[in-house]
Image (cartoon, rainbow, N blue to C red):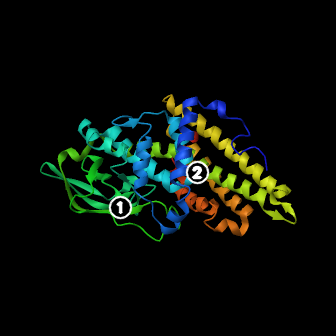
Amino acid sequence: MTGTGPLQLLAVDHLLSEEEQAIQETVRRFAAEKVHPYIADWYEAGEIPLSLAVDAGKLGLLGMHLTGYGCAGTNAVSYGLACMELEAADSGVRSLVSVQGSLAMFAIWKFGSEEQKQRWLPGMAAGEVIGCFGLTEADFGSNPAGMRTRARRDGSDWVLDGTKMWITNGSVADVAVVWARTDDGIRGFLVPTDTPGFSAPKIGKKLSLRASVTSELVLEGVRLPADAVLPEATGLRGPLSCLNEARFGIVFGSLGAARDCLETALSYAADREVFDRPLASFQLTQAKLADMTLELQKGFLLAMHLGRLKDEGRLRPEQVSLGKLNNVREALEIARTCRTILAASGITLEYSVLRHASNLESVLTYEGTSEVHQLVIGQALTGISAFGG
């Protein structure tokens, strides 16, 4: 079959600079060499090698949209395109990179002291130091303001007690950015994971994001020095701005998963014969392929628009919600529909479609559920908050 690729139909290359195209192609090669040949085995085993973080660091992928401290300093669109290529391989790989760069590193880069930045960021950019981001708790996901984790003063020290749940990279992290309630509001703390009282048991038996480390963080009398607190973050503004960074990556990343599913379905439909004809020759199959390509193209145009707004410093949180809500929802539908084209073959790890669909079930609800993003958009439209209503 010699048709047009699913992201070539609208001829969108002119939307990207030569540098952006080069970065995208470099990350695509990285994924082809370092991830694609092994991802099915990692997914089945429920593990991901930490050496991948070092490889990503050598390529400049960790904190790539940040400046200084060993970070690449690319624009937002380049970071988004990198996320797209990483998630075309697997959502867990993109999660490893985005949690490291857009959550843990960004929190330190944005809200940390110069000493904290110098201590942690160069090693994190190189992939030699792994970070995690502890905000969500078992009973407080969409409502982080209700968190129970507390930090209290004891002389000049801080003492932290509490638990965090569903934390990517937690069990392998060297430093945890932990958000806790204090007498002065919610504050962020940098917790070296070898601190007494800190533990991070791995969460197992997952059916999604299996090629990703997911953990619980347990803090029992964790004593930290006074300079462990992030000095520039007070209240929920800090952690929510970090989440906005991660959501932006998902706007692009989810399209990578969808594109890989669609390319897989196109290839399979061309080779698979049904009633002595290629599956791709049937009207119902072509209707599915056309509808999926349409949504993929629309999602990419939306992502690019948001990326340009971000690079101009004009991107608002509710606009990121538009992108995350639409692109993840449509990517999941594309993955499910591609599975129907592959039929029984679609349920095996020989093909990527059900792995992507399973991963996207998690992507749909982390960094803000679809319902939360609907309410963010609703509040922007009406001026009325419906949260808690």
The answer for how far apart the CA atoms under marks 2 and 1 are is 25 Å
36 or 287: nearer the eye?
36
Could you tell me residue 319's position as x and y percent?
A: 55, 39
Q: Based on the displayed image, in which of its 4 quarters is residue 118 positioned?
A: top left
In the displayed structure, 25 sits above or below 164; it is: above
Which label number is shown at residue 58?
none
Count the marks: how many? 2
Left or right: 54 as drawn, with respect to 309: left
Q: Is any part of residue 383 visible from this angle?
A: no
The residue type indicated by label 1 comes to Ser
Could you tell me residue 306's position as x and y percent?
A: 56, 36
In the displayed structure, 311 sits above or below 378; it is: above
In the displayed structure, 109 sits above or below 267; it is: above
The residue type indicated by label 2 comes to Ala
Which tag, 2 or 1, sits closer to the chain's start? 2
Q: Based on the displayed image, in which of its 4 quarters is residue 51 positioned?
A: bottom left
Q: Name the residue at the bottom extreme.
A: 205
Neighbor class of circle 2 (other Cα within 10 Å; few <14, some 14-19, many 20+) is: many
In the displayed structure, 88 sits above or below 297; it is: below
Residue at figure coordinates x 39%, y 63% from the top left? 215
Residue at figure coordinates x 30%, y 58% from the top left? 149
Q: Name the residue at the right extreme.
A: 276
Neighbor class of circle 1 (other Cα within 10 Å; few <14, some 14-19, many 20+) is: many
Could you tell me residue 383's position as x and y percent?
A: 53, 40
Instruction: Kindly state the secondary structure of the residue where label 1 is placed.
Output: helix
* Residue that label 2 marks: 88
Instruction: Kindly state the secondary structure of the residue where label 2 is placed.
Output: helix
* Residue that label 1 marks: 171
311 or 376: nearer the eye?
311
